[in-house]
Amino acid sequence: MSQASNTSLSAALTVMLPERVFTRSGSSIDPRSDVWEWTDGPFAPRIDFGRYNTAFKSFVPLLKQTLIPFLKRHSSGYILNLDSEFHSFSVAIDASFTGVITPQHFSNYAARMLAARRWRLSLLSLLLRKWVELGFPGVDPKCETYLLERCIPGGKKGEPVRTRDPIRGPFSEDEYTALHSAVNAAYGREELPLWSLVITRLLLACGGRISQYASLKICDFDRDSAVLNLPHAKTGEKHMRTSFIAFDIGPQTTRLLSDYIDALRAMGNGYESPLFPASVIMPVGPKRQLRESTDFYGHCVPSSLSRCFVRILAEIVPPTARLDFAPLPVTPKRFRYTFGTRMAEERASKVLIANRLGHADLQHVDVYFSASPKIVENIDKAIGSMLVPLARAFQGQLIEDEGHSTHKGAVGSRIVDFRVSTDPVGSCSGKGSGCAFNKPVACYTCFRFEPWLDAPHEKVLQRLERERERCLTDERMAAVNDEPIQAVKEVIWLCSQVQKQRGQDKTEDAAS
């Protein structure tokens, strides 16, 4: 096909394009526009057809015509993936393109594609087959038979979970507890905004997709019953607020969530307002506010919510032994993988896991059962004495004695473990106000804890290790005190370092 005839056909197809089409979510698009923008629940998809180069510019109307049927039946993410893969294909074959896409173009493109991305060939195959089926020129009809006969690999579903990938897979037990502690401590030091602490807790508690949290409204949380109704995703419905999954929320997270909602209400937000509004997550504001439907007006789009969350947590994440003590990589999807993995390790049924994760069937759940490492390794294997300084389970501040504490003996400030000694182990800079945690076990991982230098920390450690030994038949129960044990070891190590330094100072003074 010559360039002139191609251009003529392109002009004819441009005229044939309808003035208005409707997406599955009910948004309307002018398909003749160079940029498609529409709303799909909390998403704000955008396709810029102007990025296609000269050779494929005449193909744009044909591409649009082929995408229209998908617009009416599929999610925005699927449409974006189809366009993205076709654009990558057009760039790759540009040098050898003569006006018609042939099986050879597809074969050459597939041969150069990295193994990890080959599953995306199924998207390109589907688009080109639809192109031929609709009878549009530009794609050799032989492509349909070729693509139907060709074996195209699917994506390796759940590979990060199956392999326990330290970058993309679920968190290990040590990483889970260390991250939980680090986020709490950072918020206590006013290094994190409340919304980031809330969403961290909800990611741990519900295992939802980031798009589900972006769809939440204030009214989705019932304080009286402490139940969060999380919008269901990937149901094929018009948008994500059509059906919900109910989650019971723990008392500590309920209190944080209530405080957060009170702050939103004080800012003038109503009960139908977003739980994570763009105005709070992105103080500068989004580049554009594209919300034709009032259902999602003011909501932070999932990509922005994810990006802001990852950026904030990157400043405070703990190190991980699985990556030579580099900072722990954190993404919302890793919380979801961790939620499913922990449910499987706790022997939840496949049906229950599928229900909690919002899967329509069980095919995606098997991956959580495919790898079965021990739930929790003995803490002595996870952290040796040389690694104690790097563990960072202890978040407080070591002090000399009560005279150096924040409140110097005020009521409620002393921390005592009467099971091992009547002598205090330290002080609380918050005077224990409003604390619902298990004292003194939880104190060692709290940023308000001020352990004393000459206190019976070794006796506390011995008691916790005895309790752990008694629970070894249930590894999950045995792991409950692993983080406090780790924190007590850090305190003991810090005390030994101070005592060692003092001994050296005395020796040097005597020598002088």
Image: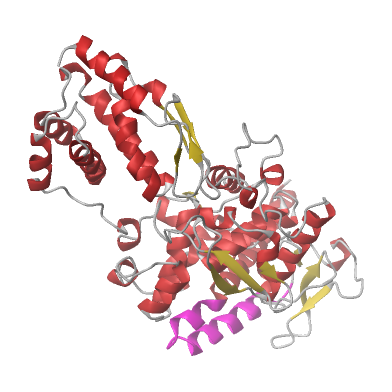
Pinpoint residue 330: horizontal percent, then vertical percent.
50, 51
Q: Is residue 508 visible?
A: yes
Q: Nearer the viewer, residue 320 or 469?
A: 320
Name the residue rendered at 35%, 61% in the picture.
Answer: 161
Q: Which quarter shows the C terminus? A: top right
Colour scheme employed for the rendering of this structure: secondary structure
Q: Is residue 269 above or below residue 249?
A: above
- Tell me where the magenta segment starts and ends, as one range: 455-480
**Which quarter of the picture shows residue 7?**
top left
Q: Is residue 500 visible?
A: no
Tell whether position 459 is magenta: yes
Q: Is residue 242 above or below residue 35?
A: below
Q: How many marks?
A: 0
Q: Nearer the viewer, residue 143 or 18?
A: 18
Name the residue rendered at 12%, 40% in the picture.
Answer: 144
Q: Which quarter shows the N terminus? A: top left
Pinpoint residue 407: horizontal percent, then vertical percent.
90, 64
Return the residue found at the far top: 4
Pinpoint residue 337: horizontal percent, then vertical percent.
42, 62
Q: Main secondary structure of the magenta part?
A: helix
Residue 481 is left or right of residue 273, and the answer is: left
Q: Is residue 222 above or below residue 40?
A: below
Q: Nearer the viewer, residue 447 or 350?
A: 350
Q: Nearer the viewer, residue 400 or 340?
A: 340
**Which quarter of the picture shows residue 218?**
bottom right
Name the residue rendered at 38%, 78% in the picture.
Answer: 351
Q: Is residue 439 above or below residue 208?
A: below
Residue 137 is left or right of residue 209, and the answer is: left
Residue 164 is left or right of residue 117, and the answer is: right
Tell whether position 462 is magenta: yes
Name the residue rendered at 36%, 22% in the picture.
Answer: 15
